[in-house]
Image: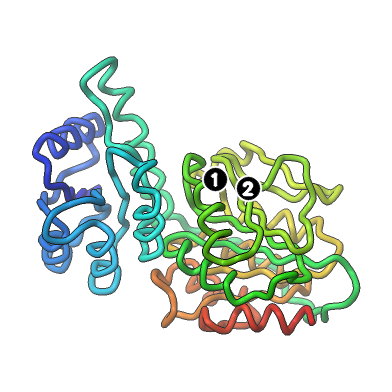
Amino acid sequence: MRVGIVNDLPMAVEVLRRALAFEPAHQIAWVASNGAEAVELCAVQPPDVLLMDLIMPVMDGVEATRRIMEQSPCAILLVTVDIDRNQHRVFEAMGHGALDVVATPALGSGSAQEAAAPLLRKIYNIGWLIGSCDNRAGAAPVPLRQAGSKPRLVVIGASAGGPAALEQLLKGLPLGFSAAIVLVQHVDEVFAAGMAEWLSTESGLPVRLARDGEPPQAGVVLLAGTNNHIRLLENGNLAYTAEPSDQVYRPSIDVFFESVASFWTGEAVGVLLTGMGRDGAQGLKLLRERGFLTIAQDQQSCAVYGMPKAAAAIEAAVEIRPLGEIASRLTGFFA
Protein backbone atom coordinates (compact mmCIF):
# COMPACT_ATOMS: atom_id res chain seq x y z
CA MET A 1 0.00 0.00 0.00
CA ARG A 2 1.07 3.58 -0.67
CA VAL A 3 1.27 5.27 2.73
CA GLY A 4 1.24 8.99 3.50
CA ILE A 5 2.62 10.22 6.83
CA VAL A 6 1.43 13.43 8.52
CA ASN A 7 3.50 14.36 11.58
CA ASP A 8 5.50 17.43 12.59
CA LEU A 9 8.01 15.52 14.74
CA PRO A 10 11.01 14.12 12.80
CA MET A 11 11.52 11.44 15.46
CA ALA A 12 7.92 10.22 15.09
CA VAL A 13 8.27 10.17 11.30
CA GLU A 14 11.42 8.05 11.62
CA VAL A 15 9.64 5.66 13.98
CA LEU A 16 6.84 5.23 11.44
CA ARG A 17 9.34 4.70 8.62
CA ARG A 18 11.04 1.93 10.59
CA ALA A 19 7.74 0.31 11.48
CA LEU A 20 6.55 0.31 7.87
CA ALA A 21 9.85 -1.21 6.76
CA PHE A 22 8.84 -4.49 8.40
CA GLU A 23 6.19 -4.91 5.68
CA PRO A 24 7.78 -4.69 2.20
CA ALA A 25 4.37 -4.25 0.55
CA HIS A 26 4.09 -0.77 2.07
CA GLN A 27 5.72 2.20 0.34
CA ILE A 28 5.90 5.71 1.75
CA ALA A 29 4.27 8.01 -0.78
CA TRP A 30 5.14 11.26 0.97
CA VAL A 31 5.57 12.94 4.35
CA ALA A 32 3.75 16.11 5.45
CA SER A 33 4.74 18.12 8.52
CA ASN A 34 1.24 19.48 9.20
CA GLY A 35 -2.36 19.05 8.20
CA ALA A 36 -2.35 21.84 5.62
CA GLU A 37 0.45 20.16 3.69
CA ALA A 38 -1.43 16.86 3.88
CA VAL A 39 -4.58 18.41 2.39
CA GLU A 40 -2.56 19.70 -0.57
CA LEU A 41 -0.67 16.45 -1.11
CA CYS A 42 -3.79 14.29 -0.91
CA ALA A 43 -5.32 16.35 -3.71
CA VAL A 44 -2.46 15.59 -6.11
CA GLN A 45 -1.03 12.30 -4.80
CA PRO A 46 -3.76 10.44 -2.89
CA PRO A 47 -2.28 7.57 -0.83
CA ASP A 48 -3.97 4.25 -0.12
CA VAL A 49 -3.82 5.00 3.60
CA LEU A 50 -2.85 8.12 5.51
CA LEU A 51 -1.17 7.98 8.95
CA MET A 52 -2.45 11.17 10.61
CA ASP A 53 -1.18 12.71 13.83
CA LEU A 54 -3.69 14.73 15.86
CA ILE A 55 -1.71 17.61 17.35
CA MET A 56 0.33 19.64 14.83
CA PRO A 57 1.06 23.29 14.04
CA VAL A 58 -0.68 25.22 11.24
CA MET A 59 -3.52 22.69 10.98
CA ASP A 60 -4.23 19.82 13.38
CA GLY A 61 -5.27 16.31 12.46
CA VAL A 62 -8.98 16.85 13.15
CA GLU A 63 -9.33 19.73 10.71
CA ALA A 64 -7.05 18.04 8.18
CA THR A 65 -9.21 14.92 8.31
CA ARG A 66 -12.34 16.99 7.75
CA ARG A 67 -10.90 18.75 4.71
CA ILE A 68 -9.36 15.65 3.16
CA MET A 69 -12.57 13.66 3.48
CA GLU A 70 -14.48 16.53 1.86
CA GLN A 71 -12.02 17.17 -0.98
CA SER A 72 -9.89 14.05 -1.63
CA PRO A 73 -11.28 11.13 0.40
CA CYS A 74 -8.89 8.37 1.40
CA ALA A 75 -8.46 5.89 4.26
CA ILE A 76 -7.14 7.72 7.33
CA LEU A 77 -5.58 5.98 10.33
CA LEU A 78 -4.98 8.25 13.32
CA VAL A 79 -1.55 7.67 14.88
CA THR A 80 -0.79 9.55 18.08
CA VAL A 81 1.33 9.24 21.21
CA ASP A 82 -1.15 9.96 24.00
CA ILE A 83 -4.45 8.41 22.99
CA ASP A 84 -6.14 8.69 26.40
CA ARG A 85 -5.63 12.45 26.65
CA ASN A 86 -6.80 12.94 23.07
CA GLN A 87 -9.96 10.82 23.05
CA HIS A 88 -12.19 13.80 22.28
CA ARG A 89 -10.02 14.65 19.26
CA VAL A 90 -10.08 10.99 18.21
CA PHE A 91 -13.89 10.93 18.15
CA GLU A 92 -14.00 14.28 16.33
CA ALA A 93 -11.65 13.03 13.63
CA MET A 94 -13.53 9.75 13.33
CA GLY A 95 -16.71 11.77 13.00
CA HIS A 96 -15.15 13.44 9.97
CA GLY A 97 -14.24 10.11 8.41
CA ALA A 98 -11.05 8.72 9.98
CA LEU A 99 -11.30 4.94 10.09
CA ASP A 100 -9.37 3.94 13.19
CA VAL A 101 -6.69 4.96 15.68
CA VAL A 102 -3.49 3.40 16.99
CA ALA A 103 -0.70 4.47 19.32
CA THR A 104 2.60 5.57 17.81
CA PRO A 105 4.94 2.57 18.01
CA ALA A 106 7.55 2.71 20.78
CA LEU A 107 10.59 1.23 19.03
CA GLY A 108 13.18 2.20 21.64
CA SER A 109 12.89 -0.91 23.83
CA GLY A 110 12.20 -4.61 23.35
CA SER A 111 11.46 -6.11 19.96
CA ALA A 112 11.01 -3.43 17.31
CA GLN A 113 8.93 -5.77 15.17
CA GLU A 114 6.56 -6.52 18.05
CA ALA A 115 6.22 -2.80 18.76
CA ALA A 116 5.35 -2.16 15.10
CA ALA A 117 2.80 -5.01 14.97
CA PRO A 118 -0.31 -3.05 16.15
CA LEU A 119 0.26 -0.36 13.51
CA LEU A 120 0.86 -2.90 10.74
CA ARG A 121 -2.20 -4.87 11.79
CA LYS A 122 -4.39 -1.76 11.60
CA ILE A 123 -3.06 -0.96 8.12
CA TYR A 124 -3.74 -4.55 7.03
CA ASN A 125 -7.28 -4.37 8.43
CA ILE A 126 -7.94 -1.12 6.56
CA GLY A 127 -6.66 -2.69 3.36
CA TRP A 128 -9.09 -5.56 3.86
CA LEU A 129 -11.93 -3.19 4.64
CA ILE A 130 -11.55 -0.94 1.61
CA GLY A 131 -10.88 -3.84 -0.74
CA SER A 132 -13.42 -6.39 0.51
CA CYS A 133 -16.12 -7.68 -1.76
CA ASP A 134 -19.12 -9.88 -1.18
CA ASN A 135 -21.15 -11.15 -4.10
CA ARG A 136 -23.48 -13.49 -2.26
CA ALA A 137 -26.96 -13.51 -3.67
CA GLY A 138 -30.07 -13.53 -1.48
CA ALA A 139 -33.73 -14.25 -1.80
CA ALA A 140 -36.30 -11.64 -2.74
CA PRO A 141 -37.44 -9.43 0.17
CA VAL A 142 -40.65 -10.38 1.92
CA PRO A 143 -43.29 -7.69 2.59
CA LEU A 144 -42.31 -5.11 5.20
CA ARG A 145 -43.60 -5.86 8.69
CA GLN A 146 -45.42 -3.23 10.69
CA ALA A 147 -44.44 -2.45 14.27
CA GLY A 148 -46.71 -4.09 16.81
CA SER A 149 -46.58 -5.10 20.45
CA LYS A 150 -43.63 -7.49 20.19
CA PRO A 151 -40.17 -6.63 21.60
CA ARG A 152 -38.56 -3.86 19.58
CA LEU A 153 -34.96 -3.56 18.44
CA VAL A 154 -32.95 -1.07 16.41
CA VAL A 155 -29.57 -2.26 15.14
CA ILE A 156 -27.16 0.33 13.77
CA GLY A 157 -23.85 -0.14 11.97
CA ALA A 158 -21.31 2.61 11.31
CA SER A 159 -17.67 3.06 10.38
CA ALA A 160 -15.77 6.10 9.07
CA GLY A 161 -17.73 9.18 10.12
CA GLY A 162 -19.77 7.09 12.52
CA PRO A 163 -19.22 8.81 15.88
CA ALA A 164 -20.65 12.13 14.71
CA ALA A 165 -23.47 10.40 12.82
CA LEU A 166 -24.39 8.29 15.84
CA GLU A 167 -24.34 11.36 18.08
CA GLN A 168 -26.74 13.21 15.79
CA LEU A 169 -29.05 10.21 15.39
CA LEU A 170 -29.23 9.46 19.12
CA LYS A 171 -29.82 13.14 19.94
CA GLY A 172 -32.92 13.01 17.76
CA LEU A 173 -34.50 10.15 19.72
CA PRO A 174 -36.76 10.90 22.68
CA LEU A 175 -35.88 9.94 26.23
CA GLY A 176 -37.62 6.67 26.99
CA PHE A 177 -37.47 5.53 23.35
CA SER A 178 -39.46 2.30 23.30
CA ALA A 179 -37.00 0.08 21.43
CA ALA A 180 -33.71 -1.46 22.46
CA ILE A 181 -30.73 -0.16 20.46
CA VAL A 182 -27.49 -1.98 19.68
CA LEU A 183 -24.64 -0.14 17.93
CA VAL A 184 -21.73 -1.69 16.04
CA GLN A 185 -19.08 0.92 15.26
CA HIS A 186 -15.68 0.09 13.82
CA VAL A 187 -13.56 1.19 16.77
CA ASP A 188 -10.80 -0.49 18.75
CA GLU A 189 -11.86 -1.85 22.14
CA VAL A 190 -9.50 0.54 23.96
CA PHE A 191 -11.75 3.41 22.81
CA ALA A 192 -15.12 1.70 23.09
CA ALA A 193 -15.78 2.63 26.73
CA GLY A 194 -14.79 6.24 26.10
CA MET A 195 -17.00 6.38 23.04
CA ALA A 196 -19.98 5.00 24.96
CA GLU A 197 -19.48 7.61 27.67
CA TRP A 198 -19.09 10.37 25.07
CA LEU A 199 -22.25 9.32 23.21
CA SER A 200 -24.19 9.15 26.47
CA THR A 201 -23.07 12.64 27.47
CA GLU A 202 -23.68 14.18 24.06
CA SER A 203 -27.02 12.50 23.31
CA GLY A 204 -28.59 12.39 26.78
CA LEU A 205 -29.53 8.73 26.29
CA PRO A 206 -28.14 5.90 28.45
CA VAL A 207 -25.29 4.47 26.34
CA ARG A 208 -22.96 1.76 27.67
CA LEU A 209 -20.95 -1.21 26.46
CA ALA A 210 -22.86 -4.42 25.75
CA ARG A 211 -22.09 -7.19 28.25
CA ASP A 212 -21.61 -10.78 27.23
CA GLY A 213 -24.75 -12.80 27.95
CA GLU A 214 -27.22 -9.93 28.38
CA PRO A 215 -30.28 -9.29 26.18
CA PRO A 216 -31.00 -6.00 24.41
CA GLN A 217 -33.04 -3.76 26.71
CA ALA A 218 -35.73 -1.27 25.77
CA GLY A 219 -34.61 2.31 26.34
CA VAL A 220 -30.93 1.37 26.63
CA VAL A 221 -28.28 1.91 23.95
CA LEU A 222 -25.65 -0.86 23.89
CA LEU A 223 -22.35 -0.44 22.02
CA ALA A 224 -20.26 -3.42 20.90
CA GLY A 225 -17.24 -3.14 23.17
CA THR A 226 -14.51 -5.61 22.22
CA ASN A 227 -12.36 -6.53 19.23
CA ASN A 228 -14.42 -9.70 18.85
CA HIS A 229 -17.66 -9.81 16.90
CA ILE A 230 -20.98 -9.40 18.68
CA ARG A 231 -23.89 -11.73 17.92
CA LEU A 232 -27.49 -12.20 18.93
CA LEU A 233 -27.97 -15.78 20.10
CA GLU A 234 -31.07 -17.93 19.62
CA ASN A 235 -32.00 -17.38 23.31
CA GLY A 236 -32.13 -13.62 22.72
CA ASN A 237 -28.89 -12.74 24.52
CA LEU A 238 -25.85 -10.97 23.12
CA ALA A 239 -22.50 -12.71 22.99
CA TYR A 240 -18.97 -11.88 21.85
CA THR A 241 -17.21 -14.35 19.60
CA ALA A 242 -13.90 -14.58 17.74
CA GLU A 243 -15.58 -16.40 14.85
CA PRO A 244 -15.81 -16.00 11.95
CA SER A 245 -12.07 -15.51 11.87
CA ASP A 246 -12.06 -14.54 8.18
CA GLN A 247 -13.82 -11.27 9.03
CA VAL A 248 -10.67 -9.23 9.59
CA TYR A 249 -12.32 -5.97 10.59
CA ARG A 250 -13.78 -6.41 14.06
CA PRO A 251 -16.45 -6.06 15.23
CA SER A 252 -18.18 -6.90 11.95
CA ILE A 253 -21.51 -5.26 11.21
CA ASP A 254 -22.44 -8.07 8.82
CA VAL A 255 -21.89 -10.71 11.51
CA PHE A 256 -24.21 -8.90 13.92
CA PHE A 257 -26.92 -8.04 11.39
CA GLU A 258 -26.94 -11.64 10.12
CA SER A 259 -27.43 -12.97 13.65
CA VAL A 260 -30.35 -10.60 14.22
CA ALA A 261 -31.91 -11.69 10.95
CA SER A 262 -31.58 -15.30 12.10
CA PHE A 263 -32.79 -15.10 15.68
CA TRP A 264 -34.71 -11.93 16.55
CA THR A 265 -38.38 -12.80 17.03
CA GLY A 266 -39.78 -9.33 17.66
CA GLU A 267 -39.90 -6.18 15.54
CA ALA A 268 -36.64 -4.72 14.28
CA VAL A 269 -35.16 -1.94 12.19
CA GLY A 270 -31.69 -2.10 10.65
CA VAL A 271 -29.78 1.12 9.98
CA LEU A 272 -26.51 1.40 8.05
CA LEU A 273 -24.66 4.69 8.40
CA THR A 274 -21.58 6.30 6.91
CA GLY A 275 -18.51 4.13 6.38
CA MET A 276 -15.82 2.94 4.00
CA GLY A 277 -16.06 -0.48 2.40
CA ARG A 278 -18.98 -2.93 2.28
CA ASP A 279 -19.40 -4.20 5.83
CA GLY A 280 -23.07 -4.29 6.80
CA ALA A 281 -24.55 -4.28 3.30
CA GLN A 282 -25.15 -8.03 3.08
CA GLY A 283 -26.40 -8.17 6.67
CA LEU A 284 -28.83 -5.35 5.98
CA LYS A 285 -30.14 -7.27 2.98
CA LEU A 286 -30.79 -10.32 5.16
CA LEU A 287 -32.74 -8.12 7.57
CA ARG A 288 -34.84 -6.84 4.68
CA GLU A 289 -35.46 -10.40 3.51
CA ARG A 290 -36.92 -11.13 6.97
CA GLY A 291 -39.39 -8.31 6.42
CA PHE A 292 -37.71 -5.83 8.77
CA LEU A 293 -37.50 -2.14 7.90
CA THR A 294 -33.99 -1.30 6.67
CA ILE A 295 -32.59 2.21 6.28
CA ALA A 296 -29.36 3.39 4.67
CA GLN A 297 -27.94 6.88 5.06
CA ASP A 298 -27.99 8.93 1.86
CA GLN A 299 -24.90 10.08 0.01
CA GLN A 300 -25.25 13.78 0.74
CA SER A 301 -25.21 13.38 4.52
CA CYS A 302 -22.47 10.70 4.66
CA ALA A 303 -18.90 11.52 5.62
CA VAL A 304 -17.93 8.46 3.56
CA TYR A 305 -20.47 6.99 1.14
CA GLY A 306 -19.17 3.44 1.04
CA MET A 307 -21.20 1.04 3.17
CA PRO A 308 -24.59 2.68 2.46
CA LYS A 309 -23.72 2.80 -1.25
CA ALA A 310 -22.95 -0.93 -1.20
CA ALA A 311 -26.28 -1.56 0.53
CA ALA A 312 -28.16 0.51 -2.02
CA ALA A 313 -26.44 -1.33 -4.88
CA ILE A 314 -27.83 -4.69 -3.74
CA GLU A 315 -31.23 -3.25 -2.77
CA ALA A 316 -30.67 -3.99 0.90
CA ALA A 317 -32.34 -0.78 2.06
CA VAL A 318 -36.10 -0.32 2.05
CA GLU A 319 -35.48 3.40 2.53
CA ILE A 320 -32.52 5.72 1.84
CA ARG A 321 -32.71 8.79 4.05
CA PRO A 322 -30.64 11.81 5.10
CA LEU A 323 -29.10 11.38 8.53
CA GLY A 324 -31.30 14.13 9.94
CA GLU A 325 -34.50 12.18 9.11
CA ILE A 326 -33.56 8.78 10.53
CA ALA A 327 -34.33 9.47 14.20
CA SER A 328 -37.80 10.81 13.44
CA ARG A 329 -38.47 7.83 11.16
CA LEU A 330 -37.54 5.42 13.97
CA THR A 331 -39.68 7.32 16.47
CA GLY A 332 -42.67 7.30 14.13
CA PHE A 333 -42.25 3.65 13.21
CA PHE A 334 -42.39 2.54 16.84
CA ALA A 335 -45.07 5.05 17.91
Residue 212 in the image, given as x and y percentages of width and height: 72, 40
Q: Residues within 10 Å of mark 2 (few under 14, many from 20)?
A: some
Between 262 and 82, the one nearer to me in the picture: 82
Residue 171 in the image, given as x and y percentages of width and height: 57, 72
Q: Is residue 46 left or right of residue 192?
A: left
Quadrant (top left/top right/bottom left/bottom right) for the C terminus: bottom right
In the rendered image, the residue lying farthest to the top is: 110
Determine whether label 1 and label 2 are within 8 Å by CB. yes
Under mark 2, the amino acid is Leu
Marks 1/2: CA–CA distance: 6 Å
Between 323 and 41, the one nearer to me in the picture: 323
Q: Which mark is residue 193?
A: 1
Name the quadrant containing residue 149. Answer: bottom right
Say which residue label 2 marks.
Answer: 209
Between 210 and 278, the one nearer to me in the picture: 210
Under mark 1, the amino acid is Ala
